Image (tube, rainbow, N blue to C red):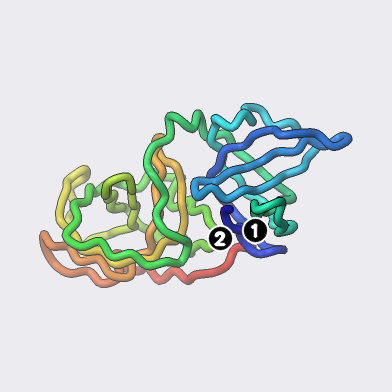
């Protein structure tokens, strides 16, 4: 049931619900479940508020151990940091794919939005990308999925406008923006069907992939 998360000795970042399930001496035992129903375990002396299984957290931690309890695969965490996002029932949509996977979105409608200053490309996941200096981004909504793609066109863009695009990109991380689960994409190729073709999605974007340490 479920899968192991990350590599032993490595780090992971994920969005999940936390539930306090026991106590061993001075330590509380928490069971953490991510969107893909993977089970993680944390033992800590700190008491986590709202660890009731109904609130959503951003969690960053080291992977201490992989173990199996019955038929359930468990990932044991250490050096864990967490941030309360909000009630799970008020967080919408789904994350897409796995970190490093490739997605092609053809003839999709995207909205053009300015990247908020100070919050540019805060990417969470097992991999990350050197933050692109991008003034704009494309927001693509496909069913229960929402994608964000850094984008600077050579022509003047009209904010909040919508247009048609072909996008080939790599999944580099996940976040929750305005209560919506959003998948960040690294643009491999972006074709603006409303005008000229822009290889790579934005000008001067030469970010490299690296494993988080």
On screen, residue 57 versus residue 91, left or right, reads right
Give the farthest residue toward the left. 194
Give the farthest residue toward the right. 25
Q: Which residue is mark 2?
A: 126
Q: Which residue does the image show at 27% across and 46% down from the upper left?
A: 143
Q: Which residue is mark 1?
A: 11
Q: Quadrant of residue 11?
A: bottom right
On screen, residue 61 versus residue 54, left or right, reads right
- Closer to us: 149 or 171: 171
Which secondary structure lies at badge 2?
loop
User: Quarter holding the C terminus?
Assistant: bottom right
- Indicate whether 102 appears above or below 36: below
- Indicate whether 152 appears above or below 205: above
Cβ atoms at labels 1 and 2 below 8 Å apart: yes
Q: Which residue does the image show at 64% across and 34% down from the upper left?
A: 19
How far across and how far down the image is residue 61, in percent? 67, 51
Mark 1: few/some/many CA within 10 Å (<14, 14-19, 20+): many
How far across and how far down the image is residue 22, in percent? 76, 33
Q: Quadrant of residue 116?
A: top left
On screen, residue 1 versus residue 31, left or right, reads left
């Amino acid at each position: 049931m479920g899968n192991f998360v990350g590599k032993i000795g490595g780090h992971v970042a994920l969005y999940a619900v936390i539930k306090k399930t026991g106590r061993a001496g001075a330590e509380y035992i928490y069971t953490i479940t991510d969107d893909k129903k993977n089970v993680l375990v944390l033992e800590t002396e700190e008491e986590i508020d709202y660890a009731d299984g109904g609130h959503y957290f951003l969690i960053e931690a080291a992977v201490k151990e992989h173990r199996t309890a019955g038929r359930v695969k468990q990932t044991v965490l250490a050096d864990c940091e967490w941030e309360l996002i909000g009630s799970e029932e008020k967080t919408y949509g789904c994350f897409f794919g796995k970190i490093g996977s490739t997605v092609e979105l053809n003839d999709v409608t995207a909205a053009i939005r300015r990247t908020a200053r100070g919050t540019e490309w805060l990417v969470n996941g097992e991999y990350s990308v050197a933050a692109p200096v991008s003034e704009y981004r494309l927001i693509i909504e496909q069913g229960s999925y929402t994608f964000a793609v850094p984008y600077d066109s050579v022509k003047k863009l009209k904010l909040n406008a919508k247009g048609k695009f072909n996008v080939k990109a790599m999944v580099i991380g996940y976040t929750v923006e305005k209560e919506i689960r959003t998948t960040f994409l690294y643009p491999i190729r972006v074709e603006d069907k409303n005008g000229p073709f822009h290889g790579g999605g934005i000008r001067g974007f030469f970010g490299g992939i690296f494993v988080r340490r």
